[in-house]
Image: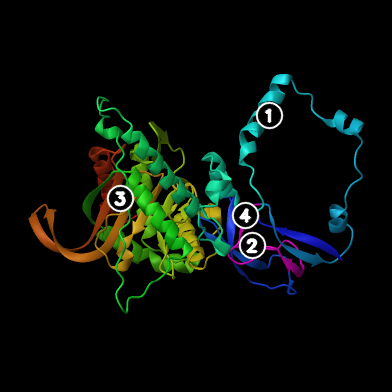
């Protein structure tokens, strides 16, 4: 028999660690190849980790609520056969100093000094064994030059009182605020007053919330905390402006009614309105590519790819935004399949971390809850988001060759929130008008 270490796999760019949510199997259980053995959570998405081999779980190394780094062993399996796994664990015969010397690359003195420089800079950040810090928290500690004595003052809110990302960021924010106060006091009276745009308003202290008898206190779950942080950050980062328009989507409704049964019979997929909305948004982005950008300081990054995020409500009441990659390269049929696949996997917690990364523009269908319109918050680092309202039958004035008439039409509000740092009212409004035009003038002969 041989031992096999089950490692936390890579989960996409920028994801360095994950929290263990639940072990599906226990120590002593036998698992088959590709069985999902553990549920994990990142700051992007919840997912399962399958085992690439069959065997028996003999040791679970990371328990529920503990954090594991990518590439770290989370369990040990006993597998059939001998040799490969056991041999890999055997210590190799140490090499002689001469063998090691001949294998080393020949570096110049300048290269050696450059390699040693970062080691010298981080040497003071070595911590005693009293702390367990996740890779993400450790990187923040080193970046902010937080000492071990300061770490001892932080009360961790994680499992076993471990310091979480939220704990360390809150400490940094409070430390920066405290260090700024003496500087303000020491400023001479004759010093010039900074320009208004350079003065950051201090964050007011949180006021205690009174709790009455019978009130229920509900602790936010991990996903809700992430959503809350993201929404506050977006409002602090982007000055939001929202434009509204009402569209006559009668042609869209009639076209879908004509094709939905045929499409479901042919493809085994439902034809919703979302692929049509995405197609209209993609066309408008191609007309106004400066909507498909991000802001980095005083630089504007114009995105090459058009990746559409779609806000999706989950059964537990939380929200997730899976991403349709390269939406401009998909047909209506392809969009319908991609949207259905992402929505189904989102609701069954089968999304991969990469499924929620890389969005350049987002659509939120508030009409699915019967809402006429909304004022959506921009997902950072995007600069705009579109909210689609409910489609409602209303009397409307139509222009005909014989004069104006009142008819029953299918009308829908859309609301477009955009970042006023880089998107002015003209660009934000014209983009929305183009989405409106594409939907209102939908060609009834469009093929799918």
| Label 1 residue SS | helix
Q: Position of residue 273 (x, y in %)?
A: 36, 61
Q: Disc 3, disc 1: CB below 8 Å?
A: no
| Label 2 residue SS | strand
State which region is magenta: 48-70
| Mark 1 vs mark 4: in front | 4
Ranked by sequence position, the earlier of labels 3 and 4 is 4
| Mark 3 vs mark 1: in front | 3
Q: CA distance from mark 2 to mark 3?
A: 42 Å
Q: Residue furthest bottom?
A: 214
Q: Position of residue 46 (x, y in %)?
A: 54, 62
Colour approach in the figure: rainbow
| Label 3 residue SS | loop
According to the picture, the residue beneath numbered tag 4 turns out to be: 132
Q: Is residue 27 left or right of residue 193?
A: right
Q: Quadrant of the rendered structure where residue 298 is?
A: top left
């Amino acid at each position: 028999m041989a031992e096999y270490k089950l490692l936390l796999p890579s989960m996409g760019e920028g994801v360095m660690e994950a929290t263990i949510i639940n072990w599906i199997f226990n120590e002593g259980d036998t698992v088959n190849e590709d069985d999902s053995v553990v549920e994990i959570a990142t700051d992007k998405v919840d997912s399962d980790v399958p085992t690439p081999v069959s065997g028996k779980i003999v040791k679970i190394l990371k328990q529920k609520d503990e954090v594991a780094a990518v590439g770290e062993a989370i369990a040990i399996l006993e597998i059939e056969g001998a040799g490969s796994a056991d041999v890999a664990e055997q210590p190799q015969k140490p090499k002689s100093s001469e063998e090691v010397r001949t294998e080393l690359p020949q570096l110049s003195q300048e290269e050696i000094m450059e390699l040693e420089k970062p080691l010298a800079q981080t040497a003071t950040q070595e911590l005693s064994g009293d702390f367990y810090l996740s890779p993400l928290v450790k990187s923040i500690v080193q970046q902010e030059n937080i000492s071990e004595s300061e770490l001892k003052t932080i009360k961790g809110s994680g499992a076993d009182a471990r310091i979480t990302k939220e704990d360390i960021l809150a400490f940094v924010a409070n430390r920066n605020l405290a260090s700024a106060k003496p500087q303000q006091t020491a400023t001479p009276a004759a010093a010039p007053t900074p320009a208004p745009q350079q003065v950051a308003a201090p964050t007011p202290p949180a006021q205690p919330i009174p709790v009455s008898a019978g009130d229920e206190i509900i602790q936010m779950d991990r996903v809700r905390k992430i959503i809350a942080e993201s929404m506050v950050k977006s409002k602090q980062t982007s000055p939001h402006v929202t434009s509204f328009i009402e569209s006559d989507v009668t042609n869209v409704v009639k076209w879908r009614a004509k094709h939905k049964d045929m499409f479901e019979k042919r493809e085994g997929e439902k034809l919703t309105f979302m692929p049509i909305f995405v197609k209209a948004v993609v066309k408008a982005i191609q007309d106004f590519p400066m909507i498909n950008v991000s802001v980095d300081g005083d630089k504007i990054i114009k995105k090459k790819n058009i990746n559409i995020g779609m806000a999706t409500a989950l059964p537990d009441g939380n929200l997730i935004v899976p991403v349709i990659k390269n939406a401009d390269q998909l047909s209506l049929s392809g969009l319908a399949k991609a949207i259905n696949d992402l929505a189904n996997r989102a609701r069954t917690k089968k999304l991969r971390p990469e499924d929620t990364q890389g969005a350049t523009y987002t659509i939120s269908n508030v009409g699915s809850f019967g809402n006429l319109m909304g004022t959506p918050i921009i997902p950072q680092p995007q600069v705009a988001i579109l909210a689609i309202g409910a489609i409602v039958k209303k009397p409307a004035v139509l222009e005909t060759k014989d004069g104006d008439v009142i008819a029953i039409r299918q009308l829908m509000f859309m609301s477009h929130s955009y970042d006023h740092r880089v998107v002015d009212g003209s660009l934000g409004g014209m983009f929305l008008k183009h989405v409106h035009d594409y939907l209102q003038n939908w060609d009834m002969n469009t093929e799918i």
